[in-house]
Image (spheres, helix red, strand yellow):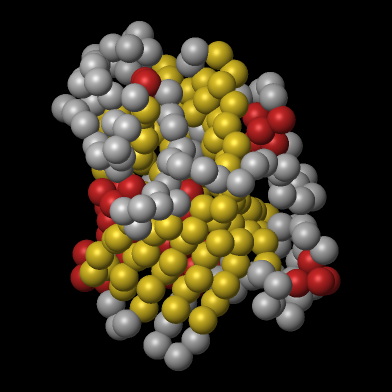
Amino acid sequence: MKVIWVFSLVLAVLLWGGGARAGVLGDRISSFPNWDRKPPIPVAKGDLVYPDWMAGNWNVASTLVDLAAPLAPNIVTPGFEGNRRYLQQPVLFKVRFKPENNNGSILNYKNKRAKNIVADRTFNGLNIAKAYLGDGAVLSVKVDPTNPNRQITVLKGEKQLISIVTARGTETLNPREFVSTEISQQVFRGESDIYLNEVETTTAYRVVGGDKNSDSVSRKIEADQVTAIYLSPQDPDYFAAGGHPVALYRYRLELLPEE
């Protein structure tokens, strides 16, 4: 269960930012771990659109660099203390971002007819799941073809992780920096139990090295990300938490172009 908990955080987290120091969302990153409540962001519609410089195939190193339990010792989430063993331990996986045309299909990222840069959620989700759980533990990752904000990860032993993005906000600080926030409802279905929570992922991305439009291997993306866990109304400690996050995880990510 502890491993599944860590994976659910990272999956909700998918790809997340560095260097932002302006704007409401960017300020949220810099104020870690002093988070009091969820940010006021609108209902999620469509997919998360990324800057053009995120298009392409990337090798990712994701490292947990800090964690906090703001309401401890009164409220501590399952697996929190066990997650300390992941501190400063890079996890490697591949991801890709490609343009999406008007009917939702993915095009080659150099296709001039492309409109928006979006994550390849099935490819990314499967690679992240295998990186954290192992190849044999993950059976499939499925994204609702009519709703990119609904994703199901099917795990060995008749287990499922259902993640639904419910709210989203973004900030473009300058041509080389981008911040995104997503809030997701998550349901983990085990053989005999169900666990629900709400996850916020706020990430600041920064393109560094080379030109932001270059395909050169010198170009890379750095990211500073915070994932916050909030209790669901079904949790017996929900009212005691008072809308505050019960766990915070900060990650450092480095994305290098795949050669």
The residue that appears at 19% across and 28% down in the rendered structure is: 108
The answer to which image quadrant residue 41 occupies is: top right
Indicate left or right for 94 with 231 as reference.
Answer: left
The residue that appears at 52% across and 20% down in the rendered structure is: 177
Indicate left or right for 161 with 65 as reference.
Answer: left
As drawn, 209 above or below 237 = above
Q: In which quadrant of the rendered image does the C terminus lie?
A: top left
As drawn, 136 above or below 130 = below
Q: Closer to the camera, 42 or 119?
A: 42
Toward the left, the furthest residue is 259
Toward the bottom, the furthest residue is 192
Q: Closer to the camera, 89 or 38?
A: 38
The answer to which image quadrant residue 159 occupies is: bottom left
Residue 237 visible in rendering: yes
| Residue 129 percent location from the top left of the image | 33, 59
The residue that appears at 27% across and 71% down in the rendered structure is: 137
Indicate left or right for 142 with 90 as reference.
Answer: left
As drawn, 3 above or below 245 = below
Residue 89 visible in rendering: no
- How many numbered callouts? 0
| Residue 6 percent location from the top left of the image | 47, 63
As drawn, 204 above or below 79 = above
| Residue 21 percent location from the top left of the image | 66, 23
